[in-house]
Image (cartoon, coloured by chain):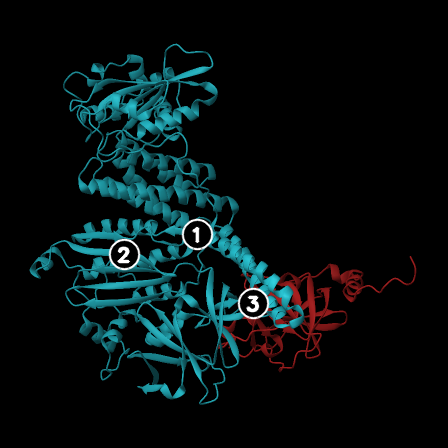
Chain colours: A red, B cyan
Amino acid sequence: MSAARPAAPRAWVDLARHAARPEARDQGLVHAQRLLVFELDGAPYALPIERVREIVRRRPITPVPRLPAEVLGVISLRGRVIEVIDLRRRLGLGARDPAPRSRIVVAHDGEGRVVGLLVDSVEAVVPAGEVAPGGGPAVAVEGLSRVGGRFVSIVDLDRVMDFDAAG
Amino acid sequence: VTARGGRRRASGKAEREFVGEADEILERMRGHLADLAERSSDGGEVPPELVNGLFRAAHSLKGLAGLFGFEPIFALAHRLEDLLDALRLGRSALDAEALDRIERAVGLFAELLSRVGDAAALAALEAPVAALAAELARHGPARGGAEAPAPGAAPRGHEAAAQRGEAERGACLPATRRQAAREAAAPGPVPGAPPPPARPDPLAELGLDRSLLAALTEYEEHRLRESLARDRNVLLAEATFEILSFEEGLAELTQGLAGMGEVLSTLPAPGECAESQIRFSLLVASERSAEEIAAALELPGVSIRRVGGGARGGGPSPEARGVESLQSPSETVRVDIRKLDELMNLVGELVIQREALAAFTARLAAEPATARSASELGRIQKDLERRVRELQEAVLEVRMVPLRQVFERVARVVRRLRSELGKEVRLEILGADTELDKLIAEELADPLMHIVRNALDHAIESPDERRAGGKPAEGLVRIEASQRGNHVVIAVSDDGRGIDRAALRARAESLGLVRPDEALGERETLDLVFAPGLSTRSEVSGTSGRGVGMDVVRTNVTLLGGIVAVDSVPNRGTAVTLTLPITLAILQVILVEAGGRRFAVPLAAVQETLLVDPCEIQRSEGREILDLRGAALPLRRLAAELGLAPAPPGAKLFAVVLRMGDARLGLLVDRLEGQQDAVIKPIEGPIPAVRAIAGAAELGGPQPVLVLDASGLLAEAHGRREAA
């Protein structure tokens, strides 16, 4: 093969790098084996990959009256109508106009409820490092994971979806 | 509380299959049971095929439960089968007690089925199942006492197998085997059974071969004696068929005979015939003569002769009734309702594509350069539209079930309640053939049951009270269903005491729902029955005092997209009217615009649309109203209701007049955009239930359009005392 081979996607590079480390194979506290990392307000956040159904480009959202402001509205996704939450606002990060790299992460909780999460951009799928409990009580973050030398905040999907308790 | 379609369902495939099949058997049992109760309350002869049908159903259910390993259903079905066996053999009498036990068993089966897959819930039913099983066993025939098969019971098993084989399939077993079984299993005398005949055995007087008589099963023999006792002609039909195709010929013959009498037994016949042929004897009881039947059958190669009975002589049967034939009489296929949902979704997608095509065609037609192709395309699109509509209607039709199934369940409860409550009540059911989407019909059962219970429990007075009030001692509860356009209206009315408005109001005041000085109109006062926690009689009864009231009825009906209204005249009676959409699947909608956004309004709920000049709007009690042909139409501004920007003042407005039952509401919108077909999808997400929004529809555009919940909006505007 020649040197002109295209660069591997970042996710694979990360995966390979992590697989090479001994501690990646011995993850005591970890909930998830792999994480989907995305960016919100310049910082990395993540969801366990098994919570993620798919990632779609931003599409027209129909606002729904009488819902909290963090709920942007609903989108059609192959015959289903799904609510989309502005994850920035939900996590108290302040709203921003969507950019071309914005994506909707379609996720589901343990009970099969589905939600769309608007994020600034999607970065990579990586193996989870050790998870340390963290995050303030008001913020739906269940812990921090060290990934590639930096801390990624793991989003607590159940709390994000629980509007009775949080707001 | 209950979300639409949120019922728990059995999860595994095997469990679903079991529940589906068992449900079907139960439905059959309910049908037989309802007929049976009807017949036995008339005091007439109970048609044997009803008891036999029930017996067969219990047997099938037992087999099915055994196959899938559902122990409680198996055990209960086993006991029920024994009881029914005793009934069909005339060993024990079909009295009110027996009927009640059968009804309760069927009820318990339904309960058990609804809990399949939920071990904890099933465990909670262990005690009632055991109790009822014991009761059924007590009722059943005294057959050597204990349940455990005694050593001598093996032949009885044999005989039972023969009977059931006959009952299940009408298959012919070798006569010798049957005979052996018969001899070994002579039943002992049973309390309550008819005493043995004092005079010489009437069977011996029949012109029948002894070996044929000996081959009859116990049930067949019982039916034969019963027919002789009723002076019916006993006839023997003999026919020869080719072995390769005998099933067809035999089925034709059986069906023909069953139309004119009762086929008591089908047996392989002795006698000469070619090796490739088989002869059958059919023992038939009929009011008609052998000659009449032979003439009516017109089947070659069939001989029919009278062998006895018939003291009253011939004459056409007043009630020719069919007996189960060898072949399944109905050409139906059972389909999982979810598969129909899938099919419906696909049709829905097709509808969306069609709308997209129509929109594109319209765009092409607007361009001079493409106008000619557009008209061609328009023609094709019109054709497609017609086909899609036909397909849509066909799929919708498949989902429809007659309300009879639901009404029969209600009738059973009424029969039980009237004896429990010591009230004389006649239940009248009209329009049971009215059809409704299966899902809606299912969800309708509970609210309907509650309304009927209320009528029996609270509305209908005791016989003494009724006589004192100059009414017939027997009360009347009438359930009447009819279709009105895209809705089905179900009215439950009684001729009881009516709703005491003063007591209702007093109770509402004591609960703080109404201020003492608050003026309420007639209708508003009656609407208080839908307020949470309200019941005019304070004592809690076992029948309807179960912590649910008319508020739950209203909530459930609203979830189905329907509305409920109550009307009552003191001392004359009460009527509760449910108005429900025929289907939840595909609806025609009117598109409207309010606050700069588009919404869809289900056309079925729209009475008319009006152009409204703002200066025509009047005010009353702080609310806007409109004079609509002399009647006051309450108005709501959709933008304000949904917290959207109002239209500039003075601009022309449109009113979409919503109407369901008697409730009306003028919804003020900024624009009307025409009609479309829409597939309404539930909104999925953390907050799925938004009041006033029924769901969303894809209408060919890139984003979903919200569909307004007409019944919710009407309830909001009228039932202001509902739970928030």
Check disc 3 and report its element: helix, strand or loop.
strand
Which mark is drawn over residue B480?
2
Q: Provide the residue designation for mark 1.
A: B397
Work out whether mark 2 precedes mark 1 in sequence or the reverse, and give the earlier one: 1
> Residue drawn at (33%, 28%), measured in percent from left and top?
B256
Going by the image, does B476 lie left or right of B654? left
Q: Tell me the distance, in whole angstroms, between the alpha carbons under discs 2 and 1.
A: 22 Å
Q: Tell me the distance, in whole angstroms, between the alpha carbons under discs 2 and 3.
A: 40 Å
Mark 1 belongs to which amino acid? Answer: Glu
Q: Quadrant of residue B622?
A: bottom left
- Callouts 2 and 1 close, C-beta under 8 Å: no
Work out which residue is located at the far top of the displayed protein and give it.
B272
Which mark is drawn over residue B305?
none
Going by the image, does B250 lie left or right of A84? left
Q: Quadrant of residue B295?
A: top left
Looking at the picture, how far across and down is residue B144, in whole percent? 28, 27
Label 3 resides on the chain identified as A
Tell me the quarter of the image containing the N terminus of chain B.
bottom left
Check disc 2 and report its element: helix, strand or loop.
strand
Mark 3 belongs to which amino acid? Answer: Ile
Label 1 resides on the chain identified as B
Q: Provide the residue designation for mark 3.
A: A82
Q: Please determine whether, in this image, residue B638 is positioned above or below residue B180.
A: below
